[in-house]
Structure formats: structure tokens, C-alpha cells
Amino acid sequence: MKQTIAKCISFCGHPLLTIPLFVTITMFATEDVRKAALVTFLIVSCIFIPLFIWLYVKSKNGTTTNFDVSDRKQRKSLFVFILPLLMLVTIILYNTGQSKTVCLSVFFGLVITFVSQIINLRIKSSLHVSMTIYLSFLIIPLNYQLGIVVFILSGLIGWSRIVLGRHTLKEVLWGGGIGLTVGLIMLYTEQLV
């Protein structure tokens, strides 16, 4: 039963599900339809769909042990794949005059991924946890209470990752620290710009 609950929480908290869902809902709730469609299309089709396909192919052909790329050595290829996509979308968003919030959100998504890559040289931090905490910081300016709920849920996601054997407590804490640090820096930077 514990494993089943952990699998459900881990699946529901997967960044490939939570972030595109957040982007789509937020963009269409806060921007005009044309701008929302452009930003959603760029982020989802240029980052998340290619990443999903890449993860699916790698896990099916055995290049990676699982869809989450839980092996630290295998994770290097994940970063090599995703960082250029994040850089490209960040540049496109900036050059098409998107809002500072959208540009900073994607830019700091790039930062959190880069920092995770550097940390991965020593320890495999939990991307599920770091991205969920970061997501909570993106939600807080829009809905403070919901942002706090998502932040608290990151603890459940961390628990699920430990129960499933995908991460140790230390790796979950590292992921949480990365998400917290980058999220705070992003909020502070947004206030300055």
C-alpha cells in the first residue's frame, strides 16, 4: 500500500506533468489568448514534448534505467539534452518581448537545471523536489495560499522518492535546498527588475 501511494504521489508530482500544467493554466488565466498560446506553445512544445519523447525512448531502449533517470551517471545525458532547450526558449521569450515574469521564470528554470547538473557531479539531487519547490515560488505571487500548499506537498513528493528508492534523504534535501535557493533568488530578482 505504501509503495502504491508513493508511486501515485511521485507520478502526480513529476515535473513533466506539473510544470506544463502550471504554464498552460497560468498563461491563459493571466494573458490574452494570443500571447498565452505563443508562450505555452514555446514552453510545452520546445521543452516538455521533446524531453518526454527523449525520456521515453531512453527508458524503452535501456539507455536509462527508468523514466526518471534515477542513475546519477545516466543523468548527465539528461542535462546535456535539456539545457540547450531551456536556453533556446529563454532567448526566444526574451527576444519576442514576453513579460519579465515569464522570461525570469524560464531563465531560473535554466539556472535550477544547471545548478542540478553541477551538483550531480557529486550527488544526485531530487529534481522532483527541487522543481516542485521552485514551482511553489512561481505560484506564490499569483496565489499565496496555493503556493504554500504546493511547497508543503514537495515534502510528500520527497517522501515518495525515498520510499520508491529513487533518492536518499540526503538527495531529497539537496533537491529541496536547490529549489528553495533558486526560488528565493528568482522572487528577489523579479522585485528588482
Image (tube, rainbow, N blue to C red):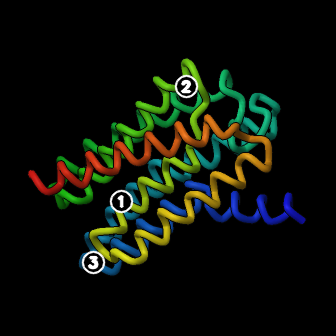
CA gap, disc 3 and disc 2:
35 Å
Above or below, 8 against 76 in this view is below
Above or below, 61 against 164 in this view is above
Quarter that holds the N terminus: bottom right
Task: Say which quarter of the image contains residue 34.
Answer: bottom left
Task: Say which amino acid is labelled 1.
Answer: Phe
Task: Say which quarter of the image contains residue 84.
Answer: top left
Dot 2: what SS?
loop
Instruction: Point out residue 172 in the picture as x, y percentages from the top left corner.
Output: 60, 42
Mark 2 Cα within 10 Å, few/some/many (few <14, many 20+)? some
**Residue depicted at x 67% and y 21%:** 73
- Tell me if residue 20 can be seen: no
- Disc nearer the start of the sequence (1/2): 2
Task: Say which amino acid is labelled 2.
Answer: Asn
Task: Say which amino acid is labelled 3.
Answer: Thr
CA gap, disc 1 and disc 3:
17 Å
Instruction: Point out residue 159 in the picture as x, y percentages from the top left corner.
Output: 69, 54
CA gap, disc 1 and disc 2:
23 Å
Question: In this view of the protein, which residue sits in the foreground, 67 or 159?
Answer: 159
- Disc nearer the start of the sequence (1/3): 3
Mark 1 Cα within 10 Å, few/some/many (few <14, many 20+)? many
Dot 3: what SS?
helix
Question: In this view of the protein, which residue sits in the foreground, 15 or 166?
Answer: 166
The residue sitting at the left extreme is 193
Q: Which residue is mark 1?
A: 137
**Residue depicted at x 78% and y 59%:** 7
Q: Which residue is mark 2?
A: 120
Mark 3 Cα within 10 Å, few/some/many (few <14, many 20+)? few
Image marks 1 and 3: residues in contact by CB distance under 8 Å = no
Question: In this view of the protein, which residue sits in the foreground, 70 or 17?
Answer: 70
Above or below, 34 against 138 in this view is below
